[in-house]
Image: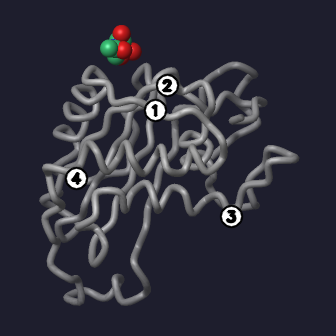
Amino acid sequence: MASSSYSFMQPLLLSIGLMLCGTKMLVEGQFAPTPEPDQRNFQQDMVDAHNEYRSSMGIEPLTWNTTLQAYAEAYAKQRSGDCALIHSHGPYGENIFWARGPGIENARYAVDGWWGEKNDYDYATNTCASGKACAHYTQIVWKNTQQIGCAYVFCTSNNGGYWVVCSYDPPGNYNGEKPY
Ligand SMILES: *[C@@H]1O[C@H](CO)[C@@H](O)[C@H](O)[C@H]1NC(C)=O
């Protein structure tokens, strides 16, 4: 997603995640029923997942912020009808994820999916493999980001997909800057 058309210091707020769980998921009628994630643990699971990954890179942890949470919840509500991978274009960094099928009962599944982009990211050159997205990963490990708030919805379309958004402040993904 990191486009060279963005000027230096302009935040690249757009990082969209889409994960399909294997080719079976593409066959109509083969979808596993959408399990309900454990709502009681969503906030803690999301913070823990981010901080586990940040800590593995020697980066300071994030804290949960209820303003960011409210922003994420309001936007998630807005997307609940279509589950679309569209950004809110708000003031925060924003990672979006959508999936359906086994695995989504774990709240942190979205973070684990974003983290997978690490394999396509080259720190030395601060570039992403051709045709790949790395901006979710770089937002997770963005050193100057201090706080997050996330929300999820189950969509009424897309066979009940699990749609997750995290808002990050200060936002990461400034073009031309390394995450850490
Ligand atoms: C939460 O985030 C908002 C928006 O960036 C900020 O104004 C507020 O100070 C933060 N709250 C705390 C307790 O850090």
Q: Residue at x 28, y 78 (%)?
A: 102
Measuring from the top left, give residue 172's x and y in whole percent: 58, 30
**What's the distance in space between the residues labelled 4 and 2, CA to CA?**
30 Å
Q: Earlier in the sequence, mark 4 or mark 1?
A: 1
Q: Which residue is mark 3?
A: 119
Q: Residue at x 60, y 41 (%)?
A: 141
Q: Residue furthest right?
A: 124
Q: Earlier in the sequence, mark 3 or mark 1?
A: 1
User: Mark 2, mark 3: which one is toward the viewer?
Assistant: 2
Q: Which residue is mark 4?
A: 82
Q: Is mark 4 within 8 Å of ligand 1?
A: no
Disc 3 crowd rating (10 Å Cα; few below 14, some 14-19, many 20+) is: few
Q: Which residue is mark 1?
A: 62
Measuring from the top left, give residue 69's x and y in whole percent: 26, 30
Give the number of the disc on residue 146. Answer: 2
User: Disc 2 on helix, strand or loop?
Assistant: loop
